[in-house]
Amino acid sequence: MTISENKQVYVYQLKVWIRGISPMVWRRVLVRSDSTIADLHYTIQIAIGWSDTHLNQFHIHGKDFGVHHVGGICFSDNPKQVLLSSFEFRLRERFTYEYDFGDDWIHEIRVENLLEFDPKKTYPMCTGGKNAAPPEDCGGVLREPLMIQI
């Protein structure tokens, strides 16, 4: 799952949205297949408007990946070496990205399309979206209180 030989580059069209928020906060991004997990992390941070000051992790094909922050989770794979192409994503496949383990912002990511690489364009790019992200450290999505029977 790490950088190896050169393969044909293509582009993933991904839709990223934050679970549990209405109206939906979403972004559509185009990322190269030779981008890394670290690249995707920074792309989401910029597209959503987060500050990259909290812990994070992707959950892809049953395994966790992420960009290490001091005091946080250590990952077995170097996020700067794990290529997106190594996952061989299928159309409509989904995976998650969690940001800020205190506020618990879970982002759903869906592969919407596989596109030809256009050398005239600069990637990554955000091509669409709606609604501003909630402020960081606001406590996360409001959840129903737990009902405890005594």
Image (cartoon, rainbow, N blue to C red):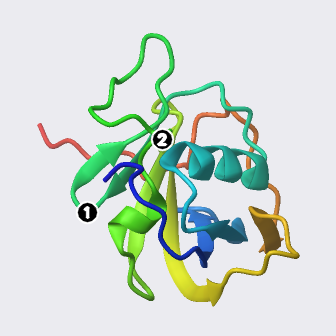
| Amino acid under disc 2 | Asp
Q: How many marks?
A: 2
Neighbor class of circle 2 (other Cα within 10 Å; few <14, some 14-19, many 20+) is some
Q: Is residue 112 above or below residue 120?
A: below
Seen in the picture, residue 56 relative to 144 is either above or below; the reply is: above
The quarter in which the C terminus is drawn is top left
Q: Looking at the picture, does residue 29 appear above or below residue 146?
A: below
In the image, taking residue 143 as reference, residue 141 lies left or right, namely right
Residue type marked 1: His
Q: Toward the viewer: 118 or 102?
A: 118
The numbered dot on residue 61 is 1
User: Residue 51, position in %: x, y?
Assistant: 74, 33
What residue is at 30 percent from the left and 45 percent from the top?
64
Q: Residue at x 39, y 34 (%)?
A: 78
Asked if residue 103 shows in the view, the reply is yes
Q: Give me the disc on residue 104.
A: 2
Q: Position of residue 74 (x, y in %)?
A: 33, 23
**Secondary structure beneath label 2:** loop
